[in-house]
Image (spheres, rainbow, N blue to C red):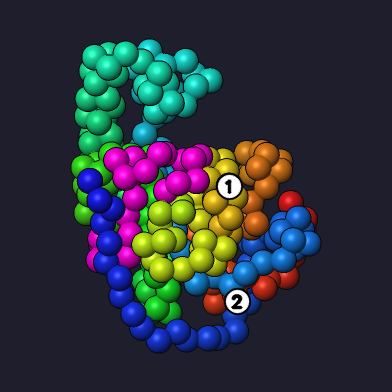
Amino acid sequence: MKPFVNIFFGVCIACTVKVHRIWYNHFSMEAGMGYIRAVLFDLDGTLTRPGALDFPAIKRTLGCPQDSAILEFLAGLEREEKSRLEAILESIELEAASLAEPNEGAEECVRALRSLAVPLGIITRNCRTSVDVTISRLGRISKRDFSVIVCREDAPPKPDPAGVLLSARLMGIDVSSLLLVGDFRFDVLAGRAAGALTALVTNCAPCPWQNDPAPDWIVSELKDIIHLVKNQGQVQARENF
């Protein structure tokens, strides 16, 4: 299945804003950074309110070790068992999708970035059917808001960088100008491996790790991404990560 693509054009608006709750990673500042020309969002826990998918419970259902990633565990199984468990996983994803809610600030963030004519995309480890259901429950957010939606059917899942590189190519931009926004280390790993910029959304919780891997920015809420993009990443460091 080919990735969903919907390219749109517009006029960029520049403005000066005050930035709150953004931490700048000094490692990226030393390396030099490109301009943000497009934003690629993770779905679960980023655009959606965290907690819809109970990963420890899913792993128990599938017989997946708690210290293993689910898709990678399934990939190592024999074909018949893999197909059986994939069907169970998809049913769990669909059930969770039917209960999905937009994350705090998600609608505001998407609407603001669209008003700035910033191309947007989604990259997720979920199946496409559940993604379609999830997006339908995100209030003022719709599939029309995204230039590309990459699911696990379209490319090897994060932390593999293939989906990020595919997204940049379909958006028609250099990957170094793409900002990947997510709430988990796989998002940062995939973005960094692809050469993209990365922002970790903590959802107002403590950062779950220290420099493993190191994102370019840490933000508390999605609305901070608006400030980040408007300022083209040139924000004052409140403290080093």
Q: Which residue is mark 1?
A: 193
Which element type, helix, strand or loop, lies under badge 2?
loop
Q: Earlier in the sequence, mark 1 or mark 2?
A: 1
Amino acid at circle 1 = Ala
In the picture, measured across the screen, residue 49 lies left or right of residue 137, that is right
Q: Residues within 10 Å of mark 1 (few under 14, many from 20)?
A: some
Percent x, y for residue 180? 51, 56
Which element type, helix, strand or loop, lies under badge 1?
helix
Q: Which residue is mark 2?
A: 231
Percent x, y for residue 23? 68, 59
Residue 162 numbered tag: none
Nearer the camera: disc 1 or disc 2: 1
At 59% from the left edge and 72% from the top edge, which residue is drawn? Answer: 35
Examine the rendering and report whether any part of residue 76 can be seen.
yes
Q: What range is drawn magenta here?
A: 141-163
At 72% from the left edge and 66% from the top edge, which residue is drawn? Answer: 32
* Dominant secondary structure, magenta: loop
Image quadrant assignment for residue 147: bottom left
In the picture, measured across the screen, residue 195 lies left or right of residue 100, that is right
